[in-house]
Image: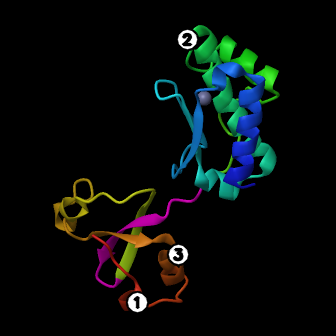
Amino acid sequence: MNFTQINQRFLALQQQYPKLASWSIKLDRARRRAGACYVQRKMISISAHHIELNSEATIIDTLLHEVAHALAYEHDRITGHGPLWRKWVKRLGGQPEVTGRFKVPDAPWMLVHLEGEELRPIAPRHRRNRSIKHFMMRGRPDTRGQLFYVDQVEFKRWHHGELSLTDVTLIQ
Ligand SMILES: [Zn+2]
C-alpha cells in the first residue's frame, strides 16, 4: 500500500466526518512507531517504514488509530487511549489495541567496541550519537575512543567472515 492510497482513505474519512476537514496527513521517517496524531497542528503522520514493512490491513488500522485520536480531540478535546478514543476506533472499524500491532524495522546500526582485530557488539542502535568519540563502556575508561557504529549489514557480513575488518566502515 502506498501513500497515495492512504491519502485516498483519509480523504474518504474527511468526507464522512466533517470535523476532519481542516486536518492533513503526511509521511515521516519514524522507526519505533507507526503513526502520530498532532492535535495542535491538526496533522496525522504515518511512518514510511511502517508502510514498507506492513500489510494493507495493518496500515489501514494505523490510519484509523490516528483518525480516532483526531475525532476524540475534535469532539471532546480528549487525548490518549481512553474510552472515548476506543469508542471512535470501534466506530471506524479499527482495533482498539495500542501495542504489538505492527512490525518495526531492525535498528540500522550496531554499536561495537573495537578491541585489537575484534569487533565486539555492544547493542543495536536506531541512531548514531555524534559524541560517540567521547564515550566509553561503563567502568572501562580504557575503551574511550574505541566505540564505533557499524552498519548492521556490514556487521553481519563481518561476523560471518564475509568481510575483513579493513573492509568494514567504522563510524565515529
Ligand atoms: Zn495512539
Residue 93 included in the magenta stretch of the image = no
Q: Position of residue 50 (x, y in %)?
A: 64, 51
- Nearest the viewer among 169 and 4 is 4
- The residue that label 3 is drawn on is 153
Task: Say whether mark 2 is within 8 Å of ligand 1.
Answer: no
Mark 2 belongs to which amino acid?
Arg
132 shown above or below 70: below
Q: CA distance from mark 1 to mark 3?
A: 12 Å
Residue for badge 2: 77
In the rendered view, tell whether residue 165 sits above or below residue 74: below
Mark 2 vs mark 1: give the one in front.
2
Mark 2 to mark 1 CA distance (whole Å): 55 Å
Estimate the x, y position of residue 125 in percent, counting from the top left: 43, 58
Quadrant in which the C terminus is drawn: bottom left
Neighbourhood count class around disc 3 (C-alpha, 10 Å): few under 14, some 14–19, many 20 upward: few
For the residue marked with disc 3, what is the amino acid?
Val
